[in-house]
Amino acid sequence: MKLSLFLAIKTIIRGDKGSLILTVLIMLVVFLNLLFVDAIFAGITETMDKGKINYQYGEVIIEPKMGDRYIKNTNQIIDTMKDFYYVKNITARITTGAVLINDKNNDGRDVVKFRTGIIGIDPEEDNDVVDIKSNIIEGRYLEKNDRGKIMIGADAAGGYGSSVFAEDLEGVRSGDNLTVEFENDIIREFEIVGIYRTKNFETDSKMIMMRNDFNSVFSTTNESSEIIMRLTDKNLSQKAISDLQKLGFGEYELADWSDKLSFGRTINESFDKIGLILRVIGSFVSGLVIFIIIFVDIVNRRKQIGILKAIGISEKSIMYSYIFRGMFYTIIGMTLGYLIMRFGVVNLFTKHPIDFPMGWMIPKIKIESLRMSILLFILAGLIGSFLPTIKEVRKKILTLMR
Amino acid sequence: MKEYILKSKDLVKTYKAESQSPVFALRGVNAEFKKGEFVALMGRSGSGKSTFLHQLALLDRPTSGQVKINNTDVAKLSENERAKFRLQVLGYVFQDYALIPELSLYENIALPMMALGFSRKKYDADVQEIIKRVGLNGRKNNLPSELSGGEQQRVSIARAIVNKPEILFADEPTANLDSEAASVVLEVMRELVDKYNQTIIMVTHEPDDKKYVDRVIWLKDGVISEER
Ligand SMILES: Nc1ncnc2c1ncn2[C@@H]1O[C@H](COP(=O)(O)OP(=O)(O)O)[C@@H](O)[C@H]1O
Ligand SMILES: [Mg+2]
């Protein structure tokens, strides 16, 4: 073993520097490329998760069971839960569906209708839980004493860049008036005071109004459609849910942020599949590179293998020396690739995140993906250096020395 | 009366290529070698000298017949045991030096010691001493490419004897050298025999080499034609 390592090291450091650099460079690029794609996928996933948590569901969300319209004991839940050590903030929202009507020229002729969800909030309370305020792109956030004022998401308003939806209001701006036809057929007119864009497309296609206005339309008082909790740590969400159940709130739908990732989850699964395919291809390429490098080298060193065998060095030691070399190229390539990724690429994108449709995306190195890639590359390196070596080393001494 | 450390009995080697007629390289060779003897194998090109040496030196397996080293029938050894035997009991010098180009003079010589699992502390003194013995003091960090042919061949001899082998085999060690370098190499070998009682079996076709050796075995068409 020691001898094999010795031979491998000497051959590497006293061998041709150009081909050494080239080999390591190829391994580096192949590995870096894989890490990069993986990190983009992980970054997108995380961005979507964050969007869901920050702009829609919080870490834990309480909703009525299917068929029920409202959560009845809203205040009781909020008063009980807000004292738990892991609860940062908590708020109740009330929601409904409605048709938004944009009468473009105020003459009833060029009218655009857009059906979407509406959220009634207490702006001061809601702002501690769902961050709309810092995502206002035009106008302002709702204020405590506002009446008949609304905010609308950029994807619903239209004209604020691309969106995932085919339809919108074809361009309303803050200051415009908007007619809303509620589910109970009541029609009211509101003034848009702000346009927001969180990049969570479900939030950005909705309209947000004052809780008081909502109550006056639906004659509601303290009912709510969802209670959103923000926790000190998103990993405590299951603890919060089990506490809610113990307190007897199991009659409601209790979900955490990860339960709400239906779309994100399918995307995640696709990413995992693509990631796996790329990893397999990447490690195959790296194994092939090692195979070619070792193969070419070994053909040029047949005589030397014969000499080593002749003076009594075991086939195993000779084989290991080539496998060590293959491993050296692989591991150095991977290490450099990782370092460039970790301290170059990730740092660069942390300073300049990529503007993705789902949010600002920073590539993220996931430990599980990294571990799997390393494992596959090492395996490929082992196979790639073993295959050409075993055949040659087994040959007869005189055949090799000829 | 010195004992024989190496014997061959009815040694036959036949090369069979698929399409061609077989080549009878050795056709029943009987020979005995004593401890501390310097023997030359001579004969015309193609007479079977190298083939004979390869069978004696465990680099090949004969078609039939026996090779005994220290009364061990080497045919009975497995490939692994033969490798160990070559490492521990035998030493080799080849016509083209056969050094590892990436290893320094010192490292080339130390290689068999490393293969035996010795640490540098254990073998350093031995290696230094052997470097002196072959007259290459002060060159130990040179790579083979920085040495002359004669010097490389002396490194090769040093590597072959560092394990203190019972028998040293050499196949035309001076064929690539000018006469001056050749005589230095042969003198080194002669000194090994005289001072350290080394057994050496050397293939050569230089008639002049006779003066360095104790005995010459002449081969002709795969059999011994004469011994002196
Ligand atoms: N691997 C081989 N295959 C076929 N014939 C061989 C092989 N090696 C040697 N020979 C033949 O065996 C004979 C003896 O060869 P060799 O021992 O190399 O002779 P020498 O060393 O005396 O010049 C020659 O006729 C040679 O052509
Ligand atoms: Mg020959």
Image: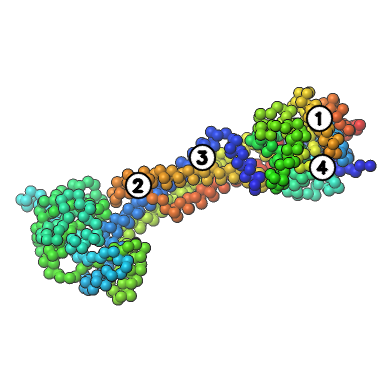
Q: Is residue A34 left or right of residue A165?
A: right
The residue pinned by badge 1 equals B186
The residue pinned by badge 3 equals A24
The residue pinned by badge 2 equals A350
Q: Secondary structure at mark 1?
A: helix
- Residues tagged by mark 1 and mark 2 found on one chain of the structure: no
Instruction: Give the residue type that dot 1 points to.
Output: Leu
Mark 1–mark 2 CB contact (< 8 Å): no
Badge nearest the viewer, 4 or 3: 4
Q: Is residue A262 left or right of residue B121?
A: left
The residue pinned by badge 4 equals B166
The residue positioned farthest toward the top in the image shown: B179
Residue A269 higher or lower than B2, as above or below: below
Which chain hosts label 1?
B
Q: Position of residue A317 (x, y in %)?
A: 66, 46
Q: CA distance from mark 1 to mark 3?
A: 46 Å
Disc 2: CA contacts within 10 A as few (<14), some (14-19) or many (>=20): some
- Residues tagged by mark 4 and mark 3 found on one chain of the structure: no
Which chain hosts label 2?
A
Mark 2–mark 3 CB contact (< 8 Å): no
Q: Is residue A42 left or right of residue A216?
A: right
Q: Position of residue A96 (x, y in %)?
A: 18, 64
- Which residue is pictured at 57% across the width and 34% down the height? A16
Instruction: Give the residue type that dot 3 points to.
Output: Val
